[in-house]
Image: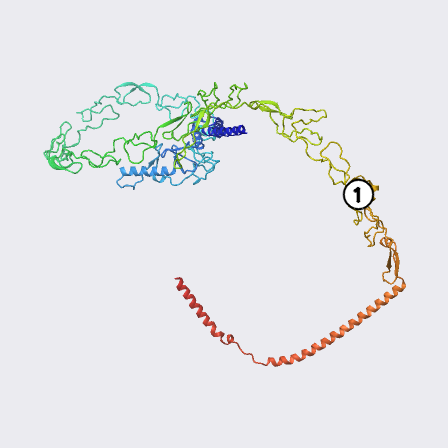
């Protein structure tokens, strides 16, 4: 019993350790199940887009972006909001950019748009917050107007507001047909169900010809309807001399690539130039004589006439106050008046006389303010005045001071690096110091499996929350048990799962191989740890350690016969030996009536000459009484103990009632049990039977068994129906309706006279009833005549009116007044 209990406790501990190991390590079967699920999902997405590429010129590359967005929508944790670096879940309200189709949380993009507009308006607008500044997408910088700031959550196609969560649809999808216009627009609409990312290329089939219109129209995908027949274009180039030799192409033909000798515009020089640019200018001065005949054209190679001489006609003096008409050979003289042109300072005028050439610098001394307006100084007007005071205003970043000397107030943007830690917590912002939130980290990080062969690229900062990809390669770590190779399983992190291969070590006692799973590194609960010193000390968590366990007892079945030779059962090898099968011994005892009831035990003598196993000296001895069945009717047990053979006849006396239950008789038991039918009169008392027959008379037979015979011969009186004639006959004949007495003529006459007498009596009674009713009617009418005279006197008495009849006309108004007063009182109380 102690060994059995030890085995049960050992199995319970092993089961608990196995459960902990299975929870701690991931099994390869779960990984294979996940891979099968991912494979099925990939096939479903591939079958969705296969119709876009099964016919002519399907563009596979354009489908990759749409496939990627749909795959990420199905994968848990694949979509990431670049603003908060958090996962986009199914139940989150989202917004999708129409430029890059990146998905953001609705609260994140609303805060981003608000901060962007605030930053731009605070830097550039004097009327802060009044102008409509755009805000950019955090990823692609696509600009949106202030009115485009998202305020409500729509599905991808924009048809349904707050789309319900449906596990059978793409997250954030309404499940309806997309119907968005394709880009570039072709007149068709997207046929996919509401989906993330860009719409795939238009799958419609159209009939179209090539760019040069020479080939016959062919059916093609609408997204690839423009095609080239690869024949020479043949259109005339801009030079007007040659034709385009390029293969059939889109758009205008390129410039003519040939080279020819061409003259310049003035015709003085000839050079080899591209046929596409026939007009060119040389660097020679024209030199033609002007119409005045005194001067030549000073323009460089030009087209057309040289024009009039620039010195002909009326010319002004240098100060532009006087005009002179002089030949073109003479220069215009000065007028002698003051120049009076505005100097470079823009305040004062030139005080010299009319002169040729530029005016001199302004030399007047003025009281000048510095650029920042804080200091003044008297100095020449043409010199700028900059003070040494440094600006203390904050730059647009609101972190650093301007520190520029004599700043006029338009402080330049901050030129220092931002240096703040980005949301990824790995890098710092490389931008110039700015206000508001930093842009999301543009870096990406590869999350690899343990062996490094499989990786997945995620935004920087997500590597801490992203699960490593499931590698399909086999784990290459060496085994940690006595086996030469470990079980095949996928690449994983942490320790390898426990080895489940058969131990196969040779057992020392029996030489069999150990069939148990490998137990070199079994997880066992640690014992003998620190015991708490008192109830105030918290108990520590149970610790488990990996250790090698000895091989379990050999369980190879060995056939062994039990002690009582009842059966041959397979016994585990470690428990082989004499054993009891726990059955009843079952050997026949000496009484030949019972078997040994002891549990299976060892027997020294086993004679089986009678066909049954005989009991041995170790078996029980029969101590019971005789239990053989007694003869029918004998209530006495056998007087002998349990014995073989028949029991002796019963000699006890019985006191038994006779058949009529009146007299008691004393008879031997064996005579009763052995008596046949003819000897049943032993119980008769020889007296008359006291039983009554059905007719009511006493039975005439002697004391007998069974029912009394129905043969009553006693005389009874029999009468006719009118009871006048009577006669004595035997009882049994009357019961059998063998004799009957009928009425004669005298009986009939007497019966007729009696009926006539009854009729006369009934008629007399009827007449008497009528006379009685007539007398009662006359008496009632007499009483009625006397009552009418009394009623006439009562009608003449005056009727007295009641109080209500007298004063009812006064009571009605009084009640109405009371009701009105009561209603007014109730209204005042409620107010």
Circle 1 is placed at which residue position? 667
Eyeballing the image, is 43 above or below 679? above
Which residue, as the protein is rendered here, is positioned at the far right?
Answer: 745
Q: How is the image coloured?
A: rainbow
The quarter of the image holding the N terminus is top right
Number of numbered discs on residues: 1
Relative placement, left or right, of 525 versus 616 is left
Q: Position of residue 659 (x, y in %)?
A: 80, 47
Q: Residue at x 33, y 21 (%)?
A: 275
Residue 223 found in image quarter? top left
Residue 601 visible in the snapshot: yes
Residue 414 is situated, as x and y percent measured from the top left of the image, at 25, 33
Provide residue 549's location: percent of width, then percent of height. Answer: 48, 24
Residue 206 visible to an observer of this rendering: no
Residue 518 % position (x, y): 49, 23
Query: Badge 1 local density, few (<14 within 10 Å), some, or many (20+)?
Result: some
Q: What secondary structure is marked by label 1?
A: strand
Q: Quadrant of residue 738?
A: bottom right
* Nearer to me, 187 or 798: 798
**Quarter residue 536 falls in:** top left
Where is the C terminus found, in terms of image quarters? bottom left
Residue pictured at 26% horizontal, 35% vertical: 397
Residue nearest the viewer, comparing 221 with 398: 398
Above or below: residue 90 compared with residue 232: below
Q: Specify whether 557 is left or right of 663.
A: left
């Amino acid at each position: 019993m102690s060994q059995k209990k030890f085995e049960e406790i050992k199995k319970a501990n092993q089961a608990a350790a196995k459960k902990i190991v299975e929870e701690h390590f991931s099994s390869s079967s779960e990984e294979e199940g996940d891979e099968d699920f991912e494979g099925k999902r990939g096939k479903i997405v591939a079958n969705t887009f296969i119709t876009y590429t099964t016919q002519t010129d399907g563009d596979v590359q354009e489908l990759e972006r749409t496939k990627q967005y749909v795959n990420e929508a199905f994968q848990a944790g694949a979509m990431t909001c670049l603003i908060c670096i958090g996962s986009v879940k199914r139940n989150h309200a989202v917004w999708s950019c129409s430029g890059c189709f990146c998905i953001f949380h609705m609260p994140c993009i609303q805060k981003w748009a608000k901060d962007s507009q605030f930053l731009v308006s605070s830097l550039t607008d004097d009327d802060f917050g009044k102008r409509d500044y755009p805000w950019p997408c955090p990823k692609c910088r696509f600009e949106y107007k202030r009115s485009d700031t998202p305020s409500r959550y729509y599905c991808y196609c924009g048809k349904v507001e707050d789309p319900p969560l449906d596990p059978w649809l793409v997250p954030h999808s309404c499940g309806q047909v997309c119907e968005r216009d394709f880009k570039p627009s072709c007149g068709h609409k997207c046929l996919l169900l509401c989906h993330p990312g860009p719409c795939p290329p238009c799958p419609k089939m159209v009939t179209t010809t090539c760019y040069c219109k020479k080939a016959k129209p062919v059916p093609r995908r609408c997204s690839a309807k423009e095609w080239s027949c690869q024949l020479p274009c043949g259109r005339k180039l801009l030079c007007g001399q040659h034709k385009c030799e390029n293969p059939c192409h889109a758009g205008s033909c390129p410039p003519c690539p040939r080279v020819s000798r061409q003259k310049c515009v003035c015709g003085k020089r000839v050079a080899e130039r591209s046929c596409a640019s026939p007009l060119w200018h040389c660097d020679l001065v024209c030199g033609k004589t002007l119409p005045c005949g005194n001067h030549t054209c000073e323009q460089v190679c030009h087209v057309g006439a040289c024009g009039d001489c620039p010195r002909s006609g009326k010319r002004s003096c240098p100060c532009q106050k006087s005009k002179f008409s002089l030949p073109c050979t003479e220069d215009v003289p000065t007028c002698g008046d003051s120049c009076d042109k505005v100097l470079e300072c823009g305040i004062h005028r030139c005080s010299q006389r009319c002169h040729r050439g530029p005016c001199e610098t302004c030399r007047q001394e003025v009281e000048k303010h510095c650029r920042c307006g804080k200091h003044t100084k008297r100095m020449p007007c043409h010199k700028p005045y900059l003070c040494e005071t440094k600006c203390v205003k904050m730059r647009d970043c609101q972190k650093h001071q301007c520190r520029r000397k004599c700043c006029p107030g338009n402080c330049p943007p901050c030129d220092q690096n931002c240096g703040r830690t980005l949301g990824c917590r790995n890098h710092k912002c490389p931008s110039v110091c700015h206000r508001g939130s930093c842009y999301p980290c543009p870096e990406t990080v590869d999350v690899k499996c343990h062996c490094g062969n499989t990786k997945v690229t995620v935004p920087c900062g997500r590597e801490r929350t992203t699960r490593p990809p499931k590698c399909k390669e086999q784990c290459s770590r060496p085994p940690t048990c006595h086996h030469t190779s470990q079980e095949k399983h996928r690449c994983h992190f942490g320790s390898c799962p426990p080895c489940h291969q058969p131990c196969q070590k040779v057992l020392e006692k029996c030489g069999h191989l150990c069939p148990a799973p490998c137990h070199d590194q079994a997880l066992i609960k640690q014992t003998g740890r620190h015991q708490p010193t008192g109830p105030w000390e918290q108990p520590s968590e149970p610790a488990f350690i990996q250790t090698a366990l000895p091989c379990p007892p050999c369980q190879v079945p060995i056939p062994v016969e039990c002690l009582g030779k009842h059966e041959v059962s397979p016994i585990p090898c470690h428990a082989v030996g004499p054993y009891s099968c726990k059955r009843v011994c079952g050997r026949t005892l000496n009484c030949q009536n019972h078997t040994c009831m002891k549990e299976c035990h060892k027997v020294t003598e086993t004679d089986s000459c009678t066909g049954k196993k005989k009991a041995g000296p170790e078996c029980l001895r029969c101590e019971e009484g005789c239990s053989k069945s007694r003869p029918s009717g004998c209530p006495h047990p056998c007087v002998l103990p349990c014995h073989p053979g028949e029991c002796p006849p019963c000699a006890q006396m019985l006191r038994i009632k006779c058949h009529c239950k009146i007299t008691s008789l004393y008879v031997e038991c064996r005579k009763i049990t052995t008596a046949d039918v003819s000897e049943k009169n032993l119980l008769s008392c020889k007296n008359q039977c006291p039983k009554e027959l059905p007719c009511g008379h006493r039975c005439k037979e002697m004391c007998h068994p069974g029912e009394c015979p129905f043969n009553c011969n006693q005389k009874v009186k029999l009468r006719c129906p009118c009871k006048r004639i009577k006669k004595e006959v035997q009882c049994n004949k009357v019961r059998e309706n063998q004799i009957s007495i009928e009425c004669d003529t005298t009986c009939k006459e007497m019966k007729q006279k009696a009926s006539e007498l009854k009729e006369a009596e009934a008629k007399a009674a009827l007449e008497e009833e009528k006379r009685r009713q007539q007398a009662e009617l006359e008496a009632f009418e007499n009483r009625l005549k006397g009552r009418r005279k009394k009623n006439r006197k009562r009608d003449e008495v005056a009727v007295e009116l009641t109080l209500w009849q007298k004063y009812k006309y006064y009571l009605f108004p009084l009640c109405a007044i009371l009701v009105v007063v009561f209603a007014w009182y109730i209204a005042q109380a409620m107010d």
